[in-house]
Amino acid sequence: MDGAEFLKRLETEIKISKLSPYTIRNYVDFNRQLLSHANKTPEMIDSQDVKYFLADKMDNKSSSSTILFLASVKFAYTNVLGKDPTSGVKRPKKEKKIPVVLTKAEVQKLFDASPTLKTRLILQLLYSSGLRVSEIVKLKTQDLDFDEHTGWVREGKGKKDRMFIFSKKLSTKLKKFISKHDGWSYLFSKDKPLSTRNIQKLVQKATILARIEKSVHPHTLRHSFATHLLDAGVDLRKIQFLLGHSSIATTQIYTHVSSEQVKNIKNPLDNL
């Protein structure tokens, strides 16, 4: 079997497994790179080829990237060829990085710097709902309830539907925007969903215009949403539900970045 046939079969297996387009892109790309680096047919790939690739190409990458690469190769070879060239390859521990969070003032600066109304609405909805960028691009008008200020993510991460909230202030602006774009298939696009890369560019441009020095991405607004809710005293379980986390352990990372809760701790010296 040549590399092209192997990658085609891999794509078929991914689609049968109902994995996301993001997963298809990453899994196929990583396996293409491995085949090119080893310069072998798929049947000849072994654990040493995987190790050589990790040493040459992934040495300066994050642990999560390495873990994703190994998962990509394992999925491909176990499903297409019935073998696992990643067995015996040591997995790195996943890094526990504290997420970047914007202050409320920085969030407002980001909105004010948005060059267009559409960009501002997208950024406000990202922050107001805590949605993932992959979820917001697929939103449709019928997914929103303007009376209850809630919405539904259809087949989000893990193919799960879930409810989200959005701002009452934003509701009126969104309704006006929708009325001007009647007939659009998606909330923010006419015929097909915006690409996640497109949203990333919008966020990056607004960040530069706002002169915010932090590294800001669409997910930064999700982190900020969760942290600001925690600062306001919202129960962690409710935040877990809104974010769509399957485990409370994932949500607990925000307890490490909630500056307001840290500020409210009474110092023991003041009690003496």
Image: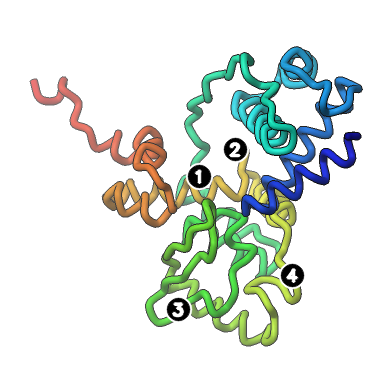
**CA separation in Å, label 1 and label 2:** 8 Å
Separation of residues labelled 1 and 4 (CA atoms): 31 Å
| Inter-mark Cα distance, 1 to 3 | 28 Å
**Quarter of the picture holding the C terminus:** top left
Q: Is mark 4 on a helix, strand or loop?
A: loop
Residue that label 1 marks: 102
Give the label, 2 or 4, closer to the camera: 4
Q: Residue 43 bears which disc, if any?
A: none
Q: Where is residue 4 in the image (x, y as percent from the top left)?
A: 89, 40
- The residue under the point 67% across, 69% down is 118
Residue 258 visible in the snapshot: no
Q: Earlier in the sequence, mark 2 or mark 3?
A: 3
Which residue lies at the image location 45% right of the left edge and 80% below the top edge?
Answer: 146
Which of discs 3 and 4 lies nearer the camera? The answer is: 4
| Mark 1–mark 2 CB contact (< 8 Å) | yes
Instruction: Answer whether residue 170 is visible to the viewer in this image.
Output: yes
**Cβ atoms at labels 2 and 4 below 8 Å apart:** no
The x, y position of residue 44, in whole percent, is 83, 21
* 150 to the left or right of 263: right
Secondary structure, mark 2, is loop
* Pointer 2 residue: 214
Which is nearer the N-term, disc 1 or disc 3? Answer: 1
What's the residue type where badge 2 is placed? Lys
Look at discs 1 and 3 and give the one toward the viewer: 3
Q: Do tag 3 and tag 4 residues touch (Cβ < 8 Å)? A: no
* For residue 41, above or below residue 182: above
What is the residue that sits farthest to the left in this orientation?
272
Instruction: Look at 47% across and 48% down and name the residue there.
Output: 224
Residue picked out by circle 3? 145
Residue placed most toward the observer, 55 or 71:
71
Compared with residue 54, is residue 218 higher up or lower down, i.e. above or below?
Answer: below
